[in-house]
Image (tube, rainbow, N blue to C red):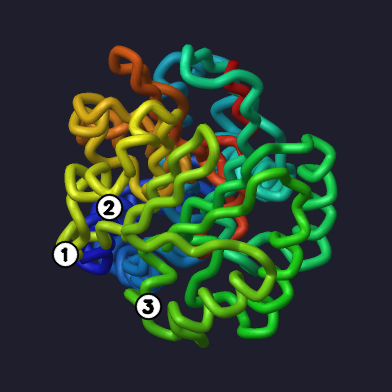
């Protein structure tokens, strides 16, 4: 699917960059462009654009950032071309390269700079509950084990009651040893009532090249005191935690319904504060009607690359990032502590989430 999208996406790129180079030769170098020269330019641009068919690799990321930035600058040129300095720096390509470098440099800084995002909730069911949520680590894409260990020490200072790992902690780019070492680091986060994990779409071996099975992930997590929940329910003194199986990318996974899962809660625990862990922010309306108190998700990366959050929000009714309240039900979707595929994140912060409920 992505390659078909990439094939369509490079067409405007080929057209625009051919036009841009022809204009550069004519206005900056004063070279007359014959049809043969234009054809040669188009051929070279096509060859340079072709690798961007893979829109998910680093080359594609740089290519489309540069294309979008150049088109934005092109529109600005309609207004600013009377200023010779702008017209020269834009027409020569200097400005486009500079702005693209700044944007991608910020994206690298942003994915490496992890912040704590705090939410304050209230409930009549519970007092003084602190939750830490970590999602979409995609271990080894932008964070080393030593960096993760440093953040785990930072999170330990929060003295959370529970810690939840809401999927895609590991993926097809995580070396086996990093999976083992990261499991140990995550298990070291200080807490009072446990660390709980649900699978994401990457950990369910839906992507080629992953070096370990879901069972090996579970074994390493559980060896470090992390409980894996796969369509399962845990009832603590005053908290219920429902861990859902991931819906898979195409939502074809035959996972248990929320009605079936809530039915597993014992009668004497029905009034507990109930938390759903679901990697993808799905079934929000359903969970609100089932009297769930809080749903924690990830998966969207908050739109890893700007302006994807905007487009995701327009094309989906799910919660791409942040908080949504439906009556007494609250859903929170984190942008994740890292990102997928390449170490660039321009659309949202890299974060772990701290939730206080009182």
Disc number for residue 15? 2
The residue labelled by disc 3 is: 205
Count of labels in the image: 3
In the image, which is nearer the foreground, mark 1 or mark 3?
A: 1
In the image, which is nearer the foreground, mark 1 or mark 2?
A: 1
Can the viewer see residue 40 in this picture?
A: no
- State how far apart marks 2 and 3 are (Cα): 39 Å
Please determine whether, in this image, residue 195 is positioned above or below residue 334. Answer: below
Question: Which residue is painted at 33% across and 48% down in the image?
Answer: 16
x, y percent for residue 285: 20, 28
Question: Which residue is painted at 26% across and 68% down in the image?
Answer: 3
Q: Secondary structure at mark 3?
A: loop
Question: Which residue is painted at 20% across and 35% down in the image?
Answer: 315
Q: Nearer the viewer, residue 181 or 47?
A: 181
- Mark 2 and mark 3 lie on one chain; the one further toward the N terminus is 2
x, y percent for residue 204: 37, 72
The residue labelled by disc 1 is: 254
Question: Horizontal placement of 6 versus 308: left or right?
Answer: left
Q: Quadrant of the C terminus?
A: top right
Q: Secondary structure at mark 2?
A: helix
Question: Which residue is painted at 45% across and 81% down in the image?
Answer: 215
Decide: few, some or many residues near mark 3? Use Cα within 10 Å; few <14, some 14-19, many ≥20: some
Question: Horizontal placement of 192 versus 237: left or right?
Answer: right
């Amino acid at each position: 699917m992505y390659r078909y999208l990439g094939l369509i996406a490079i067409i405007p790129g080929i057209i625009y960059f051919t036009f841009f180079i022809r204009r550069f030769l004519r206005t900056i170098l004063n070279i007359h462009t014959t049809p043969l020269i234009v054809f040669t330019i188009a051929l070279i641009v096509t060859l340079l654009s072709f690798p961007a068919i893979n829109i998910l690799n680093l080359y594609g990321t740089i290519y489309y950032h540069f294309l979008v930035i150049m088109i934005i600058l092109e529109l600005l040129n309609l207004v600013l071309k009377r200023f010779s300095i702008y017209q020269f720096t834009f027409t020569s390509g200097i400005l486009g390269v500079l702005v693209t470098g700044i944007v991608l440099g910020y994206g690298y800084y942003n994915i490496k700079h992890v912040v704590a995002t705090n939410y304050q909730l209230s409930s009549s069911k519970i007092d003084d509950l602190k939750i830490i949520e970590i999602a979409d680590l995609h271990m080894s894409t932008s964070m080393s084990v030593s960096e993760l260990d440093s953040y785990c020490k930072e999170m330990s200072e929060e003295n959370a009651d529970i810690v939840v790992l809401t999927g895609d902690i590991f993926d097809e780019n995580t070396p086996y040893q990093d999976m083992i070492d990261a499991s140990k680091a995550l298990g070291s986060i200080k807490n009072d009532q446990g660390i709980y994990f649900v699978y994401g779409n990457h950990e369910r071996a839906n992507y080629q090249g992953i070096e370990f099975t879901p069972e090996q992930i579970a074994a390493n997590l559980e060896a470090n005191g992390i409980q894996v929940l796969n369509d399962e329910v845990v009832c603590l003194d005053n908290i219920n935690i429902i861990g859902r199986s991931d819906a898979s990318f195409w939502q074809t996974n035959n996972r248990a319904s929320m009605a079936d899962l809530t039915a597993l809660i014992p009668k004497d625990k029905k009034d507990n504060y109930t938390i759903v862990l679901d990697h993808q922010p799905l079934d929000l309306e359903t969970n609100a009607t089932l009297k769930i108190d809080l749903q924690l998700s990830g998966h969207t990366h908050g739109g890893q690359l700007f302006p994807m959050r905007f487009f995701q929000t327009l094309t989906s009714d799910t919660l791409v990032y942040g908080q949504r309240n439906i009556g007494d039900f609250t859903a929170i979707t984190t942008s994740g502590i890292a990102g997928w595929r390449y170490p660039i994140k321009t659309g949202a912060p890299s974060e772990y989430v701290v939730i206080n409920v009182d």
